Amino acid sequence: MKKENIILHSIIEIFKQTKDKKLEAFDSLQIKKLCKPVKDKYNCTSEEALMFAIMFSKFFENSCSFDIKDIAYHLDCTPIELLKHEPSIRILLQKKLIALNYDRHTLKREQFSYLFKKDIIKSILNNTEPKKEAPIDSNISLLAEIQKLLDQYVEKEISFDEAWEEITDLLEINKHIFFANKLLSLELTFELKLFLLYVVVSYYKGDYDINLNIILDEIFWEKGSHFHDLKRAILRDFNTTTLFKLEILIVKPHNWRNDVDIELTKNGAEYLFGDDASMICVGSAKDKGEKNIILANEIKDKSLFYNTDDFKTIDFIQNLLQEEKFKCISNRLKENNMPSGITILLHGKPGTGKTETVYQMAKQTQRNIYRVDISNLKSMWFGESQKIIKKLFDDYYKYMKTQDNIPILFFNEADGVINKRKDSSSSNTAQTENEIQNIILQEMEDFKGILMATTNLIDNIDNAFDRRFLFKLELNIPTIDTRFKIYRSLLKQLNDEDLLQLANAYDFSGGVIQNIVRKATMHQVIHGIHPDINWYKDTCKQENFNKNLLNSIGFKK
């Protein structure tokens, strides 16, 4: 049974009961009683709880920040009358239950506005305690805390001065940690320290394509003196900085645009992190791009078994991707003024072999795979993200020119980029995500290579993407005959009669069957003997129970 969300219920009731009650709302015993759950959860007074509840409600009602005029309008009083209770707002800010909004566009319209941070919103909506801070006991845990502060600043939840103060305090408190000690010892302006931290955090997250304009837009959005001081320090005076003298960063000018690339060096990672330097991948974006390449000759050969209907389409596509036939088809399409690229979507339930099918097709047709890390794309969906998505396709085409056989651009588990587009008016994030999808759709419209993607959620695909995938191949749960073939290929020690029993009893995917075989291998290592048929039946029952349990709590079959 779902636990009642007492806090959310209390906030809703406070909001209803205080409507048009003027300042008398603060003295109402009935409303004070409603405030108790909020008061107890966040260790505040009834007055603070009342303000918190109204603010939270106005935040959702406005779908953005709120100000003191919003609260006054709700209570049906004037903002000047409400100033009597302004100390409660200051206390909520000190307790970090609310935050000032530093978006410069908002600041042009009003002097102060407020918002709620994600951890407070989640604690209310999910009926949980606000996430407690993990202890800082290592270089990496300290870096994670600095990343949180940088994210808050980039998202305009704290000001430049607050970021400066909180990061400086964090380093001072933890100066016994190697990373903090090294940062404090560097003779740098705070602008340069913030710049360095941004680069280090980006490398830790796996974002290597960093240039000065991106950093200036992300962390110096106020466009004040800090912006100009940093730009001058990097473009004109970098050779005089400690970052240059200690070879911590490299600045590489562009020949074709007024910008520079920033790289963290191996020496820089070792200087800042000591023994933990290996946790921070260093080098150029070009070096990192090689990690996205899966070479065809390094893919292990693996036998895959398909249902009869599925195999027909797979066999057709595999023949199509044979280089000689592919070139012939591509040329024919060009002659007819049609897009020459091939786009393929593999969909089906988890464990049906979608990813492995792409790998084996690549191996059989001797095509390298240019793998797209979807999680990295999501982490870049702010600011410069549209340019980065465009660059992804540009980099693929550049790589394609270096290869004898056209490589496969592979979006694995692509649900995050091909799902139904959102109402762009709902939030800035939705608008940005839609813009990114539009870029991918434009690239697919006249695609010149081979693009393959996989998804478990075909029902969520946007109609525009549905049209742009030339082939849509569903991999179904194996039939009894296919399951028998999978079992027989993996379990040589069981006879066909036993294998047929297992194939008949449970409609498992190939991925689940492989998990069962892995458990059998562990059993053999621990006990020194192969498991018998009864062990397999018991294990299958447990797998089936787990699957039914997931279905019963809301996961799709």
Image (cartoon, rainbow, N blue to C red):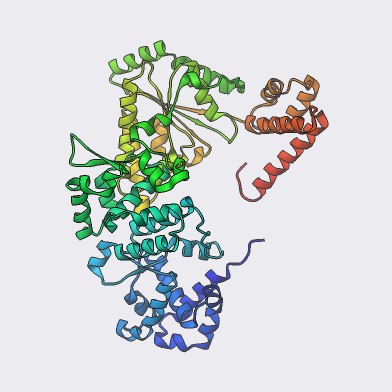
Q: Quadrant of residue 305?
A: top right
Q: Residue 26 or 292: which is nearer the viewer?
A: 292
Q: Work out whether residue 34 or residue 254 is closer to the camera in this orientation and state it.
A: 254
Judge left or right: residue 555 versus residue 359.
right
Give residue 196's position: percent from left, percent from top. Answer: 32, 50
Residue 91 visible: yes
Q: Is residue 302 above or below residue 111?
A: above
Left or right position of 46 against 208: right
The residue nearer to you, when weighing 142 against 288, is 142
Rendering coords of residue 490 (x, y %): 69, 23
User: x, y percentage for residue 219?
Assistant: 30, 54
Q: Quadrant of the C terminus?
A: top right
When the figure is inspected, residue 194 is found, relative to residue 418, above or below; the finding is below
Q: Please provide percent x and percent y for residue 151.
A: 38, 55
Residue nearest the viewer, comparing 282 with 422: 282
- Is residue 515 positioned above or below 335 on the image? below
State the residue at coordinates (33%, 76%). Answer: 68
The part of the image, by quadrant, that contains residue 493 is: top right
Instruction: Name the residue located 47 percent from the left edge and 14 percent from the top edge.
Output: 319
